[in-house]
Image (cartoon, rainbow, N blue to C red):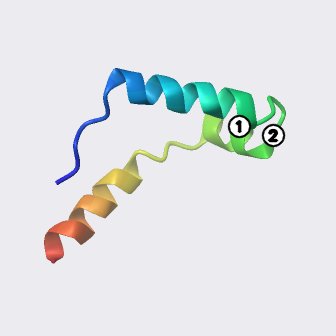
Amino acid sequence: MLKPKSPQASFYGAYLYDRIVPQDHLLRKINQVVDFSFVNDLLWISILKF
């Protein structure tokens, strides 16, 4: 089972994301307009099948 992310882990992830990915990078633009939250649901469905 997946554990919920701790606030500290998400802080470091956001920090690294800000340091590594330039502000004008295509991935940042995509992240602003696309909601990828559906991926978690799809993963849970595929995990539960096994």
The location of residue 28, given as percent across then percent down, is 70, 37
Q: Quadrant of the N terminus?
A: bottom left
The residue carrying pointer 1 sits among few (fewer than 14), some (14 to 19) or many (20 or more) residues within 10 Å by Cα, namely: some
The amino acid marked with disc number 2 is: His
Secondary structure at numbered mark 2: loop
Find residue 39 and report its image quarter. Answer: bottom left
Furthest-right residue in view?
24
Secondary structure at numbered mark 1: helix
Residue for point 32% across, 62% down: 42
Image side of residue 45 versus residue 33, left or right: left
Q: Quadrant of the C terminus?
A: bottom left
The residue indicated by pointer 2 is 25
Residue for point 31% across, 62% down: 43
The residue indicated by pointer 1 is 28
Residue for point 24% across, 60% down: 44
Find residue 15 and report its image quarter. Answer: top right
